[in-house]
Every structure is written in structure tokens, then in C-alpha cells.
Image (cartoon, rainbow, N blue to C red):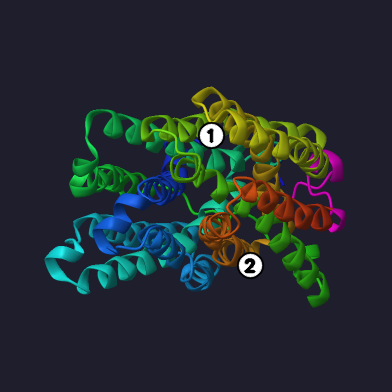
Amino acid sequence: MNPSATEARLPARQVFAVVSGNALEFYDFVTYAFFAAQIGRTFFPSDEKGVSLLASLATFGVGFLTRPLGAFVIGRYADRVGRKPAMLLSFWLMGLAMLGLPLVPSYASIGMAAPLLVIGFRLLQGFALGGEVGPSTAFLMEAAPPMRRGFYISLQAMSADVAVMVAGLVGVGLSSVLGDAALDAWGWRAALLLGVVIIPFGLVLRRTLEETLHRSPPDPVAASTAAPVYTRIALVSLALMATATTTNYLFTYMTTYASATLGMPTTIAFGATVVIGAAGVIFDPLGGWLSDHFGRRRVILIAWLIFGMLVFPCFWLLDHLRSGPALYVACGLLASSATLAGTTALVAITESLPRRVRAGGFGLIYATSIAIFGGSAQFNAEWLTQHFGSPMVPAWYMIGALSVGFIALAFLRETAPVKTGRLES
């Protein structure tokens, strides 16, 4: 690679054009999770306690089922035709789904057509988002200076946490000024529609992107990699992402957990997401920067060790104090350590894949792990909490996910150029 390429900087507007899709993904998905109770009462009314919420969370999970299909179809398109056209396609589909869902009439208005339409839009959204993450992450890696890949890819994760923080602020604001009836009737719809505003700007900016697929010759080492090595990379990556996505989506569940399980006021519960998003905004780029300087494996290992030591004390604190300060401290500590590891895992997986299958491969690994583990995490945690009646269930769930991650980490090869000396893209 030309040495000058290592010094090139990706213009800020192009970074925004790429990461905006990821930001929208998390804004919409997290906002849905925040208003799961209100959405459940709107589209899945039931006289039995807890059934509407479970039905709403199940529909939240439905959005993950089509992610692997989107990752395969749009990811292959990105690897064969280009990153730019694939990102434009996924953004168009995402905008359609995001606009349609909050405009669906209630069950009381159109009966069974309402939940069916909601499920349909969730499936379309899952397909679009499944095809979004692979091309956009591949673009960031290929456009970034090799010695700063970790930092640039971490901006993808940081955009998600900016969206989480904004979604939390929107939730706090709406719950502060609106009563329960208004939140059920239209408050949650307004929150979801806010995300649609960025769609036109994102499309305009993405049209200005430079293609990176054919930017440099293929890596001859990657091109000759044997099938068993690909299998190992896929399995290790899937396990790493299983841990990262499970903990991440359990964090987005904390608002529902705080209000439904711990009985905290809605305004305080929404504040947890602001804290989680703020922690991500700080520790995402920090994780990328640290991994560029010290290697991917070391950052993941230390961060997950800290996270593992904090999980039970934090949930014990929550269960016994059930206060706003306890909730915010627990969420801040857990989210900070988990974010360092999760962001770095994204970087390591992306670097492990050769360019000719990078977008589709990473997208499929990411989408599959979310579909199986992340999409089911909130429903499983809520169902297990109701079944066992213990507020400590999410802590055990997180520890189980963390155990899988440690096993995968033992088989993960170091990919950081600072450790390997390799600069190929």
C-alpha cells in the first residue's frame, strides 16, 4: 500500500454519510424497545397482565429474522458491484420501513390488519438493516488509514450510541410532558417519526461517496485462504458477536426492566438509556483508539474481565436500592466496559475477512448473531424474569453470554497492524 494512503483522512461528511445508517438503525430499534409497553397496548391488546408487553417484544425480535437474508443479498451485491450502491439500496428500504410502522392505525381501528402490518414493516426493516452493516463497515475499513482502522470503525459503533442517547432524551422529554394516555395514543409514534427526518440527508450524502471495493489489488494471502480457516473465522466471529449483541440489546432493555420489573417511574427509567448512550459515545472511540495502539485481543480481554466483575454487584445494587442514582451508576459502569470490548470485536472481525467477501461475510455474521442472540435477548430476559420472579435474571443472562465470548477470544487471532505489521486492506 502506498505510504501516503496511511496518512489519508476520510472527510467528515463521508463518515457521517456512512454511519448515519447505523445511527438510524439503533435510534429506531431502541425507540421501539423504549415504548414496547405502549406499542403492545396499541397493537396487541390483552386483559392478561404481561401478555401485551411480551407480544410487543416478540414483534421487536421479528425484525431480526430477516437480517441474515438482507445481509446475504445486499452484502453479496456490495462485494460484487460496490459498497456505495449497496448502502444506497439499504437506506431506501430502511426509510420506507421506518416511515410505515409509526403510521399504522391501532388494533382498535383496523383489527388484525394492524399487528400484521407492524410485523411486515419490522421484517422489511430487518432486511434493510441486515444489508446495511456489512457494506458500511467494509467501506470504513477500506477508506481508513490502516493504523487507524480501529478508530474509524469505532465511529460506526459510536453513531449507534449517539442514537441511543438521543432516543433516551426523546423518551425522557415525551414522558415528562405527556401523560400515559397521550404516550399510548401518539407519543411513541412521534418518537419513531423523528428518525425519518435524517433519511433524505443521508441519501444525498451517500451519493457523494467514493467506491472502495476496487481501491487496491486483492490480498493474495486472503485469496488463497483455505475453507477450514474461513470456517474457524466465521465460528469465532459469530461467538464474539453473540456476546456483544446479547449484552448490547439487554442494555436497551434496561428502560423496560427499570419500569416493569423494578417499578421505577417512566421518566427515571428513560434516563438509563441516556446514560448508556453517553457511555458508548465516550468509550466507542476510546476502544477503537486503544486497539489501534495495543491490539484488539488485549482490549477485549481486559474490558470483558472488568464487565464480568461488575455485573452482579451492579444488579444487586439495583435490586436493593431501586433508585435513579443506582440505575444510572449501574448502567454507566456496565455499558462502559461492555462498549470497549464490543467495539473492538467489530474491528477484529472486519479485519479477519478478505475484501472479496468482507461486506457479505461481516454482514451475515453480524445479522445471524443478532437474529439468534440479540433479537431474542429482551424477550427471554422478560419471560425468565416473570417466570422466576427474580430481578437478577438479566445479570445471569449477561454472564452466560460473557462465557461464550471468553471461549471465542481464546481462538481469536490478532489483526491489528501495530501487532502484525500488515497493512493490506
Find the distance from the CA under tag 2 to the CA under tag 1: 33 Å
Residue 411: x and y, percent? 86, 58
| Observer-nearest of 276 and 23 | 276
Q: Is residue 284 visible?
A: no
Callout 2, which amino acid? Val
Q: Is residue 123 visible?
A: yes
For mark 2, what is the residue? Answer: 357
User: Looking at the image, which residue is at 79% across and 77% down?
Assistant: 227
Residue 236: x and y, percent? 77, 62
| Observer-nearest of 2 and 230 | 230
**Under tag 2, what secondary structure?**
helix
User: Looking at the image, which residue is at 38% across and 69% down?
Assistant: 123
Based on the displayed image, in which of its 4 quarters is residue 313 positioned? Answer: top right
- State left or right for residue 150 relative to residue 78: right
- State left or right for residue 361 relative to residue 378: right
For mark 1, what is the residue? Answer: 276
Magenta part mainly helix, strand or loop?
A: loop
Badge 2: few (under 14), some or many (20 or more) residues near its Cα, within 10 Å? some
Badge 1: few (under 14), some or many (20 or more) residues near its Cα, within 10 Å? many
Numbered label attached to residue 332: none
Compared with 66, 83 (above or below) is above
Residue 250: x and y, percent? 56, 49
Compared with 159, 54 (above or below) is below
**Under tag 1, what secondary structure?**
helix
Does residue 354 belong to the magenta stretch? no
User: Looking at the image, which residue is at 64% across and 66% down?
Assistant: 356
- State left or right for residue 14 relative to residue 415: left
Residue 279: x and y, percent? 57, 30
Q: Earlier in the sequence, mark 2 or mark 1?
A: 1
The magenta region covers: 410-425
Compared with 420, 375 (above or below) is below
